[in-house]
Each structure stands twice: as structure tokens, then as C-alpha cells.
């Protein structure tokens, strides 16, 4: 799963970029701007892309209003489709949502939300890729009063990496469960 904007210039601009490498090479070649129909001056950030490269999810404040919301776009073979809000029940709140992570099957969306005060990890699931996501639920097994930020989940949905705020600063945490969902 690709989780980072990648190249330094892309980070500075806050725009998703793509860098590719020859499998036999050791370095990525220069990043090329991949048009995900960014809105100038708006913060598109924290993208997660399906392993086959067909779908991207990201958060953005392109709607204005000072909070970030989720968008998704599909690769048409030549360009990205116009980003739209993913369908579902209460995916966006007035508190704003950040750091989406979509599972490889495109059925479970993990993310960070402040809808209960501090930053916590939430998940929303759907039964098929054509259905809307169900109502988000907090991942209570990992959430604390300190605040957590979504990172990565394994393909079998059994391992999660996330960042937790603490008196020591930001720490990377790992949690594991025995079986999927």
C-alpha cells in the first residue's frame, strides 16, 4: 500500500505525486505530477492507493470550511476521475477526518477522526465495492485519551500500525489480533 506523498517537492506543494522505478534499479526516477484534479491552494493529503493502482483515497479541505473530508478517485487508464466523496453513512463529521487507509479488498476504510474529542482511529466497512460504507465505529482496542493517528493495516486485517501522542512525543505503535474482522 502506498501511503506517503513521496518526493520532497510533492510534500512541499501538498500534492500527490507518483515516482516509478525500474525493478532492477535502486533509486526512484524523478517524480511526475499525476493529475488527481487538485484544487490550487487546497490541501490534498495522506493518500492511500489500492495495490493495483485503480483507486485512490485521500483527505482534503477542498470544500473549504476549515475541516478535511474524504475523497476517492479511480484510474481510468489515462487519468484519474474527478474526486468524489465516498458513499456511506456519516463518513464525514464536522470535526474533520484525516489519514484514510483502505484495505486491499476496498471494503474497509480506516481513518483518524476527532468526532469524540481527541484524535482516534475509526473504521467503516461495506459488503461490496458498489455499496456505501456503513456507519463508522471507533477502534476501541487501540484508542486512548492520548490521541491516535491511523497508519497501516495488514491485508488480513490482523495487524495495525498507528501513531500515538504521549508525554514522550509521537510514538509508533503496533497491535495484533488473531483473526480478520
Image: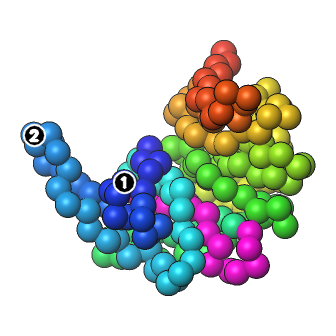
Q: Residue at x 61, y 69 (%)?
A: 60
Q: x, y (%) of residue 19? A: 27, 57
Q: Residue at x 33, y 57 (%)?
A: 7
Question: Is 43 on the left or on the right of 109, as rendered?
Answer: left
Quadrant for the N terminus in the image: top left
Look at the picture and state if 85 lies above or below 180.
below
Residue 60 part of the magenta segment: yes
Q: Residue at x 48, y 78 (%)?
A: 38
Q: Residue furthest left?
A: 24
Q: x, y (%) of residue 119? A: 77, 46
Q: How many marks?
A: 2
Residue bearing mark 2: 24
Residue bearing mark 1: 6
- Neighbourhood count class around disc 1 (C-alpha, 10 Å): few under 14, some 14–19, many 20 upward: some
Q: Residue furthest front?
A: 168
Q: x, y (%) of residue 108? A: 65, 46
The boundaries of the magenta stretch are 53-67
Amino acid at each position: 500500500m502506498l501511503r506517503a506523498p513521496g518526493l520532497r517537492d510533492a510534500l512541499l506543494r501538498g500534492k500527490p505525486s507518483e515516482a516509478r522505478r525500474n525493478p532492477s534499479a535502486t533509486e526512484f526516477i524523478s517524480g511526475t505530477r499525476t493529475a488527481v484534479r487538485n484544487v490550487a491552494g487546497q490541501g490534498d493529503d495522506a493518500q492511500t492507493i489500492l495495490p493495483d493502482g485503480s483507486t485512490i483515497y485521500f483527505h482534503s479541505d477542498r470544500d473549504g470550511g476549515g475541516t478535511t473530508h474524504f475523497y476517492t478517485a479511480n484510474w481510468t487508464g489515462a487519468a484519474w476521475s474527478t474526486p468524489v466523496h465516498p458513499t456511506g453513512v456519516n463518513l464525514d463529521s464536522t470535526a474533520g477526518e484525516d489519514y484514510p487507509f483502505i484495505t486491499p479488498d476496498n471494503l474497509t476504510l480506516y481513518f483518524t477522526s476527532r468526532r469524540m474529542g481527541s484524535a482516534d482511529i475509526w473504521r467503516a466497512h461495506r459488503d461490496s465495492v458498489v455499496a456505501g460504507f456503513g456507519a463508522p465505529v471507533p477502534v476501541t482496542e487501540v484508542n486512548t485519551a492520548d490521541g491516535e493517528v491511523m497508519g497501516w493495516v495488514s491485508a488480513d486485517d490482523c495487524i495495525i500500525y498507528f501513531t500515538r501522542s504521549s508525554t514522550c512525543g509521537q510514538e509508533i505503535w503496533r497491535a495484533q489480533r488473531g483473526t480478520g474482522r
